[in-house]
Amino acid sequence: MTEALLEVRNLRVQFGEFAALEDVSFELGAGETIGLVGESGSGKSTLARALLRLIPASGGTVAWRGVDLLSCDSATLRRLRRDLQIVFQDPLASLDPRMTVGETLAEPLRIFERALPAQARAARIGDMLERVGLARGMVHRYPHEFSGGQCQRIGIARAMMLRPKLLICDEPVSSLDVSVQGQIVNLLLDLQLEFGTAMLFISHNLAVVRHLSHRILVLYLGRLVEVAARDALFAAPVHPYTRALLAAVPDPTRLQTRVSPVAPADGRRIAGEELSAGVSAGAAGGAAGGCAFRSRCAYAEPFCALAAPVLEQVAAEHAVACHRRRELVYS
């Protein structure tokens, strides 16, 4: 991996009695893309917002080029924000309906590049609109005049106006048509290649994550359960939850529904389409300690209830949080 820009150590986010994130640690290098996958409610968006201090963290560190974003003063954080940008899930809701596209894209320049002349600012805005596939003449239009895909292009343009070194994409294509999803993904790849931006890409779509990412983090109920290089994860997933996620991906070459290789402790099989219903069950299983996934796992043993597993290496650049990880590597 290249030089680490972002170093996250033991990040924890708690809302009252509920721990949304627990001991999350990873690094992100310059120009690297990390995919973050997991079910709804697993803490993906919470992680994205905690990294940027949009919500308060309860513990841990988030070091951006050596500066802890969680403990630095507001002036330092404001200065660093030009390098840390986010693209939100809902493209229309993330844009101010009272601002034109030109005003939206001008805002980051007015904040961070105040000395930039108006003519140069207008040129930068026009160039960026064209870069994301929109016409310069659209600067005077409002968000409601655009389609969902066009609004997401505007959101990406706004995030890239300052050429940030880190772009966090929180489900940026989930609300778009499939054909538009491909266009947005290719746009992100082109921008990353052009500007050398590191990306944390959050998505339910494993095909998109596989296309974009260098490494993948698998999150379950606020904990990382597997971290691996993209090809290694898809070729040989180890954690039972990761296997279930991959088994839930529709396979057009098969007529029958693919069945997950995991099951609850009572032996009942979990089909891929039933995975989303298991979040509450998993939460209940992990409430008393131990592995949170044990109530859904075909490999669970009594000792899985005694302590939560920690991430440990099973191969080069491949870590798994499972008490039976060494057996599962070869299964």
Image (cartoon, helix red, strand yellow):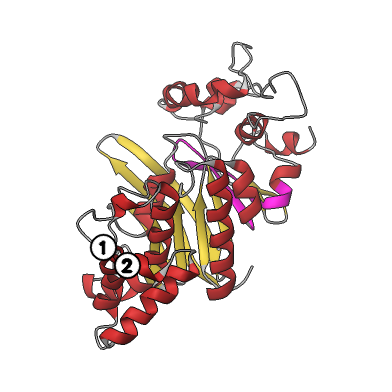
Q: Residues within 10 Å of mark 1 (few under 14, many from 20)?
A: some
Q: Report, in whole angstroms, how far the alpha carbon at label 2 lies from the one at label 1.
A: 6 Å
Residue at x 19%, y 57% (from the top left corner) = 98
Residue 85, percent from left and from top: 39, 64
At numbered mark 2, what does the secondary structure look like: helix, strand or loop? Answer: helix
Residue at x 27%, y 40% (from the top left corner) = 15
Q: Is residue 217 magenta?
A: yes
Residue position for label 1 = 100
The residue lying toward the viewer, choosing from 300 and 257, is 257
Of callouts 2 and 1, the N-terminal one: 1
The N terminus lies in quadrant: bottom right
Residue 246, percent from left and from top: 66, 35
Residues at discs 2 and 1 in contact (Cβ within 8 Å): yes
Q: Main secondary structure of the magenta part?
A: strand
Q: Which mark is residue 139?
A: 2
Residue at x 38%, y 79% (from the top left corner) = 124
Q: Which mark is residue 169?
A: none
Residue at x 31%, y 58% (from the top left corner) = 53
Range covered by the magenta-colored residues: 214-232
Residue 111, percent from left and from top: 24, 76
Q: Residues within 10 Å of mark 2 (few under 14, many from 20)?
A: some
282 up-or-down from 136: above or below: above
Q: Is residue 79 magenta?
A: no
Q: Is residue 248 left or right of residue 8?
A: right
118 up-or-down from 315: above or below: below
